[in-house]
Amino acid sequence: MRTNRMWCRSRKGMSTVLGTLIFVGILFSAVVPMFLVMQQADIILDQEKLEIRRVDDERSRELMDFYAYPVNDEDKIELKVTSRFELPIHIVHLWINNTRRDIDFEIPPMEQDMVLDQYDVPTKAGVTKEFKVKITTDRGNVYESKTGDIIHDGSDWTNPELQVIVFVGAQGSGWWNQWGNYKAKLTRTATGYSYEQTKSWTFGTCMFQFDPSGITVTPITLTDSGPGTYHLLVQRKSFWGGSWTTIRVMDVTITWPSGSPIVEVYI
Amino acid sequence: MRRRALSEVISTVILSGVVLAIGGAIWAYSLGATTAIADGYVSDTLGLVDEIVERFDVEHIHYNLTKDILRIWIYNYGEVDITVDVYVTAKSTIEKSTRGDQPNGVDILSEQVLIVTFDFSAPADSLVSGDSVAVEVYSRRQNCAYKSYVVP
């Protein structure tokens, strides 16, 4: 009897050992690799999620000022950019109206006033044509020229209106600081010609907009004389009256045609 | 005693053989099943990766008033090729899409621009200055880009 029981245990033991080996074999040759592969796929997915989040973040933070302006006496425009982004910007497309050109420019981080190139534009004698210029980066952002539409009147380039826009915010938290009289005076440094505007009883924020056609000069003159600098003086008289108090004195520079014809000042 | 020993050896061999045969079959089935499951999972995950990383936008729209043709530039600035369907709604009533002419979608390679053109030359479709056009671009991975445009 003892012998039979021993044989029986032995037979069970052999099957158990084989079964265990098969189970362990299946575990290590099929199930474990499957989980490893699935885990690797999950890791790739997580990596791509992080990567695309970084790419989207870079795209949303990418910022530059783009200027397109005519080249004097030529049917060409010149492009200039100022990067306001801490990473390189790669420009891939140039749009002049509805025509796309593939271009390839790498703008270094925070690069100031980088002239890209000059491009022919199809002007026609006696025909006024407007040119909308914009560029596209490889991050998918599109930047329109801050100089606005460039107009050729059929014989020469025309000027945009030069403007200085002064935004004055509330000068304190109390309601009496929200109201007041504001005066802004813009004086051209070179000639002394000045413009003055006054806003009264303005709540919160007021805006002065100088449209100084008198100081608008042709692009040729501006190019010859360099950037135009203006002296800005902003004063405030409180809600209760009294004398004018200076709240800001500063110089404003209009760099058209190689910069925006409109300068905004926030006070 | 000798016969019994022999039968016990044979039965052990038979039992072991049965265990090996069944175990081998289960092993083979498990190997195939887990491989198929892993392949499917990886394929789905990589498809999800493509869906996540694809990026495109409507870069430019232009309506030619003399030829009554609407042109749409779609820029695929992502890392994967895409297939898109373009839907246009003009004046809130005129609807056009690429599904009719290109039921399999419009392919745009990575970092490439594709121009999609719609014909508005039919008298009822013709647009005039000031008309609005809404452009929707759907990728086959169900991402979307939208842009509105006013005929200048």
Image: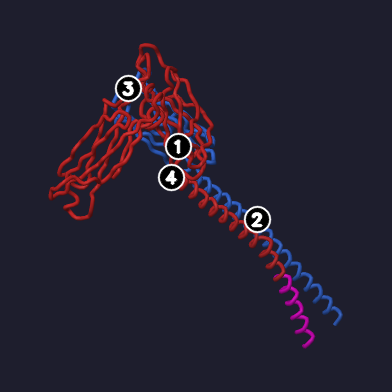
Q: Which residue is mark 3?
A: B126
Question: How many angstroms separate mark 2 from mark 4 (CA)?
Answer: 46 Å
Within 10 Å of disc 3 (Cα), the crowding (few <14, some 14-19, many 20+) is some
Upstream in sequence: badge 4 or badge 1? 4
Instruction: Nearest to the eye among marks 1 and 3: give it.
Output: 1
Badge 4 marks a residue whose secondary structure is: helix
Q: Position of residue B140 (x, y in %)?
A: 47, 40
Write the residue at 81% across / 72% down.
Answer: B10
Q: Is residue A265 left or right of residue A1?
A: left
Instruction: Nearest to the eye among marks 3 and 2: give it.
Output: 3
| Chain letter, colour red in render | A
Q: Which chain is home to disc 2? A: B
Q: Position of residue A37 (x, y in %)?
A: 62, 56
Q: Which residue is mark 4?
A: A60
Question: How many angstroms separate mark 1 from mark 3 (CA)?
Answer: 42 Å
Q: Is residue B81 left or right of residue B134?
A: right
* Amino acid type, callout 2: Gly
Image quadrant for the C terminus of chain A? top left
Q: Which residue is mark 2?
A: B32
Question: How many angstroms separate mark 2 from mark 1 (CA)?
Answer: 59 Å
| Chain letter, colour blue in render | B
Q: Which chain is home to disc 1? A: A
To the question of a shared chain for discs 4 and 3, the answer is: no
Q: Position of residue A195 (x, y in %)?
A: 23, 32
Q: Give the magenta range.
A: A1-19
